[in-house]
Image: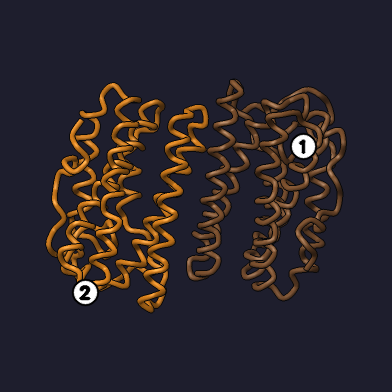
Chain colours: A orange, B brown
Amino acid sequence: MTAPGGILQAPTDPGWFALAVERQSDLLIDHANCEKKAASTALSLMFAYPEDFELAGRMSRLAREELRHFELVQQKIAELGVVFRRLSPSRYAEGLRRAVRRQEPARRGDLLLCGALIEARSHERFLGLIERLGEPLAGFYASLAAAEARHAGLYLRLADRRMPDAAARLAELAEVEADLATAPDPDFRFHSGTPATRQDHGTA
Amino acid sequence: MTAPGGILQAPTDPGWFALAVERQSDLLIDHANCEKKAASTALSLMFAYPEDFELAGRMSRLAREELRHFELVQQKIAELGVVFRRLSPSRYAEGLRRAVRRQEPARRGDLLLCGALIEARSHERFLGLIERLGEPLAGFYASLAAAEARHAGLYLRLADRRMPDAAARLAELAEVEADLATAPDPDFRFHSGTPATRQDHGTA
């Protein structure tokens, strides 16, 4: 299997980063949503496969770390006086979920590979944000970036041990992921594609 | 508001404890399910009320502690060589959920009060188990009991700050809870009523 950093099939468009710098409040609010969603995804794997003790233990620890990050993002939001608004989820997670096969054991493997791709994309965007954002957010993203790469690696290892064809299937899912993360997107979100316009349609 | 220990309207029947001593494997397996479910409930409150920052922060920390407990129960299951089997959920959580009002803000308050009742019942059962189980489980439950009382207190305080009528509504929900926890139940589970027979119908 490829190293975590190398599994993405397309880099984030500079247009996404330009908008992220402009819309730091939305970036943080949606980042908090993503950490919460990451914990929820880990928990849902624990519920779906309770007899897989290794997976359950790993996902429980992962969910705790995602929740800790959620708390850190909330704290940053409060420190910076960001006014909270509800943001609809981006099309990204739902788009990936549609590519997951329904039958077991293929489903479990696909969910793990999607986890790896999401974490790898977060890591790639964190690195790009560190270069472009001023303080305090550059330092904040620097403090969180290593964890995303580590999470991607964890998901990849778990998938690899449970699938005969992990590498081939990863390439297929990575294509779907790359499209979702780069194709024109109506909304700006942490995992959105390149926003088509500067307008936002997406409050929940 | 009453102190956490005093909010239950009926004690657990000795028949439940007798069966718990007999069926320690199922007790542990369902206990692991309950810790996982407790984390999931906390997370669902974070998703439902993202603008309530105090609630989100408290629930995130609570979910992390429930997950840590889940990991400890899984570890105990492995240490004791308990053979895992899937157990259907008890009627308890679903029964309480049916009593929750649909309209906001009543719904949020009811969910918090239900959280308090579930934690208080866990605490009551942990205390009874400590008296009746031998080692290592007596010591194990002793190490976890204080947290359940603390969680009940947290849910009560959060409800109290968000509802004008918390005490009156708590009394109503406590009646539903007492019935679910003590009326004859087809299955033995951590939060089940008194099992009607020694038979188990309930694998998932």
Instruction: Give percent across and percent down for residue B112.
Output: 65, 61
Q: Quadrant of residue A72?
A: bottom left
Q: Where is mark 1, residue-wise?
A: B129
Type of amino acid under label 2: Glu
Question: Which residue is more in the foreground, A166 or A89?
Answer: A166
Q: Where is mark 2, residue-wise?
A: A22
Question: Which residue is more in the foreground, A158 or A166?
Answer: A158
Q: Classify A116 as above or below A199.
A: above
Instruction: Compute the Cα span from label 2 to label 1.
Output: 57 Å
Q: Quadrant of the N terminus of chain A?
A: top left
Q: What SS does tag 2 mark? A: helix
Q: What SS does tag 1 mark? A: helix
Instruction: Give percent across and percent down for residue A25.
Output: 32, 73
Chain letter for mark 1: B
Instruction: Give percent across and percent down for residue A63.
Output: 44, 47
Question: Which residue is more in the foreground, B67 or A27?
Answer: B67
Q: Quadrant of residue B24?
A: top right
Look at the numbered discs 2 and 1 and tell me whether their residues touch, using CB distance below 8 Å.
no
Instruction: Give percent across and percent down for residue B50.
Output: 48, 66
